[in-house]
Structures are given as structure tokens and as C-alpha cells.
Image (cartoon, rainbow, N blue to C red):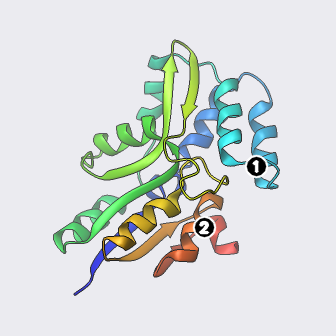
Amino acid sequence: MKKIAVLCDFDGTVAQDDVGDLLFRTFAQNGEVEAAIEEWMRGEISSRECLEREAAAVRCCPNTLEKFLSTRRLDPFFKDFHDFARQRGIEVVVLSDGLDYYIEQILIRNGLGAIEFFANRLRVDGETLAVEFPWYDMLACTECGCCKTHHLYRYRQEGYYIVYVGDGLSDRCPCESADLVFAKGNLLEQ
């Protein structure tokens, strides 16, 4: 039997909300976040540029950020799904064009700290945020900050049947290469 890997988007898929979007919209000091998001949705800028601009617009101390994150919730069925899959030897991996800072905290808080995930890195320095992109341009693609398709190909090379679960713009590319796709939200319209 072929190995199976379920690759899941985080914001709006594993998490109930788009945590990154809410974070930036909640703590932005000006209208830069909305302008950057609109330009990204129209395809005028990459998600990397959008994230850089969003982070630069935010002023938030670590304590306030922690309080904000403590109210974010996972999809109510994700933990059960994860446990069901793992009991059957199915890999479950989170691929996100969001930020490791909140993904890690939310997963740990929900007893899922062992899940492998790949995302952009958030640096918090006082009240200033900055984003680093360790998975950018892995396939000579400049669309996303974290190239989900790169990770998908790695699992494919290891012999996995790929199931992809997502809901938005950053999920379009990996959906083209997955063996099976479960789409929700904006991804259904793509």
C-alpha cells in the first residue's frame, strides 16, 4: 500500500480563522495592511511583499501578541482528524504561507506540537515585527513566501500519495500537483 501524506494549509483550514490576517489587521498602525492585501489579491505584489509590508505596519508587544493568540482556535474537527490519520500511518503536515510564531503556539496549546510544519518565520523585537522567508523561491517561483509546492514535491519524491487541503490563494499551486484536493473557502472558486 502506498504511503499517504495529508498536507494542510493552516490559516482558515487547520485554524478556524486566518490568524495572520487577523493579527495584522488588529495591530496595524495605518491603512498599509488593507492596501497591501488588495494589491496581493489583484496579483500586483507577491505574498512575500505583502507580508513584509503588513509586518512593518504593526506595533505590538509580545505580551499583547500572546493574549491575542490565546483566543485563536483550531477547526474543531482537526485534532480528531489528525489522530485518526496518525493511527492509520498517514502523515499530516502543515504547509503555510503564514507565520511560524502563531502556528507553533496554537498547535502546542492544542496538544499537536509534534506536527511537522513549514511556514515563514516571524521575528518579534520589542514592538516591531519582521518576517523571514526560509522557503521562498525554492522552485524559482516568486508567488509565495513559503513555497508549498516545494514541500509537496519532497513528499512525492519520498513515495507519498499526496492529499492537499486548503482554502485560499496560496493553495492554488500545490493543488495543481496533488493527487487529491479538498478545497474550501476561496479555493473552491479558483
Image quarter for residue 70?
Answer: top left
Location of mark 2 (residue): 173
Quadrant assignment for the C terminus: bottom right
Residue beneath the point at 49% across and 41% down:
134
Task: Give the residue displayed 66% in from the left and 52% down from the top.
Answer: 142
In the rendered image, which quarter contains the N terminus? bottom left
Q: Which mark is residue 52?
A: none
Q: Secondary structure at mark 2?
A: helix
Pointers 2 and 1 in contact (C-beta within 8 Å): no
Which residue appears farthest toward the left when viewing the image? Answer: 87
**Rendered view: 161 above or below 68:** below
Cα separation between marks 2 and 1: 15 Å
Q: Earlier in the sequence, mark 2 or mark 1?
A: 1
Q: How many marks?
A: 2
The three-letter amino acid code for the residue at tag 1 is Trp
Where 56 sits versus 88, above or below? above
Q: Secondary structure at mark 1?
A: helix
Horizontal and vertical percent position of residue 137: 58, 51
Viewer-nearest residue: 152 or 40: 152
Label 1: which residue? 40
Q: Nearer the viewer, mark 2 or mark 1?
A: 2
Circle 2: is it few (<14), some (14-19), or many (20+) Cα within 10 Å?
Answer: some
**Residue 66 spot, x, y in % from top left:** 43, 26
- Three-letter amino acid code of the residue under disc 2: Cys
Q: Residue furthest bottom?
A: 1
Q: At 61% across and 58% down in the image, what residue appears? A: 170
Viewer-proximal residue among 124 and 30: 124
Q: Please indicate whether residue 151 sits to the left or right of residue 17 in the image.
A: left
Q: Position of residue 174 (x, y in %)?
A: 54, 68
* Circle 1 crowding by C-alpha within 10 Å: few under 14, some 14–19, many from 20: some
